[in-house]
Amino acid sequence: MVANQNRSFKPRKRPVQARSEATVSALYEASIQVLLAVGYRRLTTTRVAERAGVSVGTLYQYFPNREALITSVIERYLEGISSSVEQACHTLSGHPLDQVATGLVDAFIAAKWSHIDVSRAMHEPLGEVSGAKLVTTAASKAAGFVAEVLKKCPDACFPDVQVSAHFVVLACSSLLQAAVTDHTNALNPEKLRGHMRSMVRGYLRETCEGG
């Protein structure tokens, strides 16, 4: 733990040219492939560089160590989930509350389950790279999108829409994280979808003014 406190989790530089962006994208993809193949404990910058088809020196131009690399990979993964929620919110804008609740649940499930192996692989390194902070930041961003679509529900009005939105995001994220890391498959997507829809619809109706 002490050693990690002195290590930078930030990339050395951001890609600004198409070639640099392609290199970084290749490193991200290679990191996921190595995670899936051998797990985080055996992930090394050498393995990632080899899988990406670049030298370790090239990798170090962007990331000072494997923690910085995997932090960026997790950030990109979480950004993908936030983007999926944002797109769903745009589509659902102006729709009735029940339809919004159902659509939000479906968006979260699709984002997590479309690449469930990747979602599972991301779980292991979270404790090593300030994962809680990354997840909190992503959840706050997603909650902002959800709050905006809740404001535009024609049949609902919330006393504190930000709190309601944040709860929906945290509840969906927590349940899905538990589900994707449960290798017994006790919670399959369709069973989970039904329970989550009921939970989110019931909560949002209950917290509406006059509900």
Image (tube, rainbow, N blue to C red):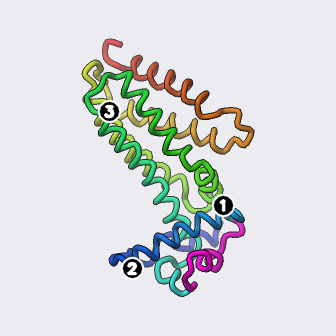
Disc 2 and disc 3 in contact, CB within 8 angstroms: no
Occupied quadrant, residue 168: top left
Disc 3 and disc 1 in contact, CB within 8 angstroms: no
Q: Which residues are magenta?
A: 41-56
Q: Earlier in the sequence, mark 3 or mark 1?
A: 1
What kind of residue is marked 3? Leu
x, y percent for residue 17: 33, 78
x, y percent for residue 60: 52, 82
Residue beneath the point at 33% across and 76% down: 16
Q: CA distance from mark 3 to mark 1?
A: 34 Å
Q: Which residue is mark 3?
A: 92
Asked whether 147 falls inside the magenta stretch, the response is no
Q: CA distance from mark 2 to mark 3?
A: 37 Å
Q: Residues within 10 Å of mark 2 (few under 14, many from 20)?
A: few
What kind of residue is marked 2? Arg
Q: Which mark is residue 19?
A: 2
The residue closer to the viewer here, 59 or 18, is 18
x, y percent for residue 116: 60, 48
Q: Which residue is mark 1?
A: 36
What kind of residue is marked 1? Leu
Q: Earlier in the sequence, mark 2 or mark 1?
A: 2
Q: Earlier in the sequence, mark 2 or mark 3?
A: 2
x, y percent for residue 46: 64, 80
Residue beneath the point at 51% across and 84% down: 58
What secondary structure is marked by label 2?
helix
Depicted 110 relative to depicted 20: above or below: above
